[in-house]
Image: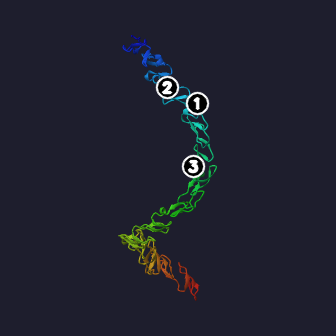
Amino acid sequence: MCTPVNPLCNAYNMSSGICITCITGYMIYNGSCQQLTLIYPHCLTFNGDVCVNCSNGYYVGNGSMCTPVNPLCNAYNMSSGICITCVTGYVFLSDSCLSLASLNPNCLTFSGLMCQKCSPGYYLGFFSACTQVSNTCATYYMSNGSCITCIAGYSISNGSCLSWLTLNPECASFDKGICLNCSLGYYLGTNSFCSAVSPFCNTTYDMATGNCLSCIYGYVLIQVSCISAADLNPNCQTFNNTICTNCLTGYYIGSDGNCTVVNSLCTTYIMTSGVCTGCVYGYLLTNSNCIATSIIMNNRWCSDFNGSTCTNCRNGYYIGSNGICTVVSSVCNTYDMNDGDCLSCFTGNALSNGTCIKTSSSNPYCTAFAGIYCTNCTNRYYLGPGPSYVCTAVGAACSAYIMTSGICISCYPGYHPSNGGCH
């Protein structure tokens, strides 16, 4: 029997009558021709049985279905449904519209996207985000959250509230943030902060300044600081507390207690004084000094040297201008150690400008000359008148006389002065 085909079919199977295609405005859906507007209720325009344009608030999604756009979108991409802008109170972030309140939950008032006022305990930070103020602030600046005052037990430091112990960890007791006294080994320094005392101080130190009053074993108090005995006496080998008891080789303990270097020319020396007892090759020991053999040979009459310089000559010699010991004139009785000038002469010689000259036979009692002229006579002689200036005997009865004229001033007993003589 011939059965009528669905009038909505455009083409159908001849043996079964099942629609293959539908008339315009219809499409095969669940095995029958269904109206497109019922299948795609939000589609505005079709191309055949494919939706190409949806009503407002929808976009063509998978399977050409009109898919609803996020209701928080203010504007969106028609082909993908992705939000471009959001409704008031929301902001587009990571392809979604998120509420300003969820992004900045501690904001009380918004102006557009920007927070204008935060909840108590918060301030406007970067990008207008409400940032929590430190819970140690008592009052703070609304603009940046810096503390103005602090809660009890805290003090302001560069806009932050720090605990008193954090700021001054070695303080033993406070009074309103001001340290009153410090832990052992610390003293109240600048701005009442506890500063460490030198670790080399003994337990006694000035509480006000931290200056050491005594030192630990092996250290010496110099003014107000403790200095290592080894630093003060680096060439000491062993100490008894701060006293050196033995020096390194080549040093001896000097009068000040420090190790003093021994003369490098010494091969052996007295440990307590550094005095040489032996010299290196080419030097001879002279009065505990090592003098080069060549120097001694060139200045063999020197009795004392200071280095290579002669400081004293043997008897009968003086140090000449060249530093060599020079013999004194054999007729000098006494002489000047510095220049060798005669100070007095042996009998038969007279002193003339530091030189002893043989007495003239015409003036045998002269003891000193200036050139050819006599300037001083031997005892009981006086200088006669010039030009000869011959030494003339004083009267035998004179007990005292004038040196320049021979006139008697007083006489021996039994005589009396008369006309310049004694009678």
SS state under label 1: strand
- CB under 8 Å between callouts 2 and 1? no
Question: How many neighbours does mark 2 have within 10 angstroms: few (below 14), some (14-19), or many (20 or more)?
Answer: some
- In the picture, the disc for residue 84 is 2
Q: Amino acid at mark 2?
A: Ile
Residue drawn at (55%, 31%) of the image? 100
Q: Are marks 3 and 2 in contact (CB under 8 Å)?
A: no
Between the C-alphas of marks 3 and 1, the distance is 39 Å
* Image-quadrant location for residue 206: bottom right
Mark 2 and mark 1: Cα distance apart in space:
21 Å
Residue 362, quarter of the rendered image: bottom left
Residue 235 in the image: above or below residue 58: below
- Locate the N terminus and report the quarter of the image it occupies: top left
Name the residue: 49% across, 26% down: 83
Report helix, strand or loop for mark 2.
Answer: strand
Residue wearing tag 3: 166
Q: Earlier in the sequence, mark 3 or mark 1?
A: 1
In front: 320, or 137? Answer: 137
Place of residue 175 in the rendered image (x, y in percent of width and height, measured from the top left): 64, 51
Measured from the top left, where is residue 187 in percent x and y? 58, 56
Q: Amino acid at mark 3?
A: Thr
In depth, the one of 99 and 366 nearer the eye is 99
As drawn, the label of residue 110 is 1
Where in the figure is residue 9, as x and y percent of width and height? 41, 13
Image quadrant occupied by the C terminus: bottom right
Query: Of the residues tagged 3 and 2, which is closer to the observer?
Result: 2
Taking the spot 38% from the left edge, 72% from the top edge, the residue there is 284
Is 172 rendered above or below residue 42?
below
Q: Is residue 366 left or right of residue 172?
A: left
Q: Amino acid at mark 1?
A: Phe
